[in-house]
Image (tube, helix red, strand yellow):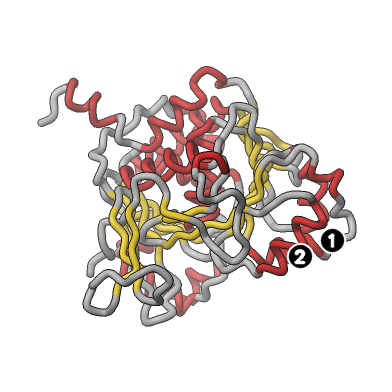
Amino acid sequence: MQNAFQSEKLIVHNLIYHFQQAFSKNVQKIAIEDDELSKTWSWEDLDKKSSQVGYRLRELGLGMGDRVLVQIDKSVEAVILYLAVLRIGSIFVPLNPAYKSAELLYFIEQSRPQLMVCDKADVFRELELPKTIFERTHSLPSLMSTSLEKRTYLPIEPVHSYAPACIIYTSGTTGKSKGAVLSHGNLLSNAQVLQFYWGWQNDDILLHALPIYHVHGLFVALHGALINGSKLLWLNKFDAPKVVDLFLRSSVFMGVPTMYTRLLNAKNLQPEKCTQMRLFISGSAPLLATTYEEWHQRTGHLILERYGMSETIMLTSNPYYLERNPQAKFRVAGTVGKPLPGLNLRISDDKQQALPVNSVGNIEVIGPSVFQGYWDQ
């Protein structure tokens, strides 16, 4: 049995602890503003609500290492559920809301969740779920009900740094999708490195327009704001003209290349719309050099491109502070920069022998953000 001192030491490995440290002095300030709903949540709201939902999850029998399979649309409530799952030491397993019933069955059978949260009633009618899972299926509204107000504050569950926090399923381009197991330590190390490398500032405001069922929107964007205690302007769906208008109230934006293409087609994109912006980041797919150059011409900003994987989170990045790398005096279109601090990368052949510069081969990586392995494989 752990004594109190050991438990206290382990709490610092839980990702939630570090989020709390970031906003502890500004609990009454706005953490998330949903522009579509004209609704705001303070840091205290996020902490309290995630605690109450965590308490509810405990009542449902959830605990350390249990999987929570989640297939719901993007919302602030979905973020609160995510934080609640981390708080109690369970494992968050997000899925694309577009998956059909037949596809969903594979993930259920593979991850064997103790709880499934899904807001699409037709899924339950079409699937013959195992009794143990069917009895533990909930919609998000049922978990966020007003009855939560009666529940007391739930302390953060102590975890080891290697304790699994999330299972992210890969795209499955070379076979069946596999569940990459990422620990609290993996997620924390990458969030802290990006906070430093991308120069997150005290007054930064992140415009969040990405989905939150994959690495880019959930870990890179959301974690970036939470670990820095930065306000989020929240969009549940991407809308190019609206995003352009919100640039005037933001300082950081992360998007995929198709988003930048659609933004370039927006009639209201003008340099004056981007005067408050500090950083534009692109990832999840290669950014065309023509898009990079056109964005620079239209806005006066150079997009920062970076590279990562579900199994490793972020690996490389073009520079933010250019003076930190004397060899890179500017960001280079069509490249994803150099390895992030604390990570070592090399290009190798099929025999795992390192190749010289400018070679084509396999990417090998060592570092604290490298995942724990594939779930049940």
User: Image check: 229 left or right of 291?
Assistant: left
Residue at the top extreme of this rendering: 25
Relative placement, left or right, of 196 versus 322 is: left
On residue 262, which mark appears?
2
Asked whether residue 45 appears in the rendered view, the answer is yes
Which residue position is annotated with label 1? 266
Depicted 102 relative to depicted 296: above or below: below
Label 2 and label 1: CA atoms lie apart by 7 Å
Extreme-right residue of the structure: 267
Q: Is residue 108 above or below residue 12?
A: below
Where 345 sits versus 26, above or below? Answer: below
- Which is nearer the eye, 295 or 243? 295
Marks 2 & 1, CB-CB < 8 Å contact? yes
Residue beneath the point at 71% across and 66% down: 291
Judging depth in this view, the residue of 294 and 8 nearest the camera is 294
Q: How many marks?
A: 2
Residue kind at label 2, given as amino acid type: Arg
* Residue 48 in the image, given as x and y percentages of width and height: 49, 28
Kindly state the secondary structure of the residue where label 1 is placed: loop
Q: Please indicate, yes or no, whether residue 109 appears anywhere in the rendered image.
A: no
Q: Residues within 10 Å of mark 2 (few under 14, many from 20)?
A: few
Q: Secondary structure at mark 2?
A: helix
The quadrant of the image that shows the C terminus is bottom left
Q: Give the camera-side residue of 200 and 78.
A: 200
**Residue 53, horizontal then vertical, whole percent:** 45, 38
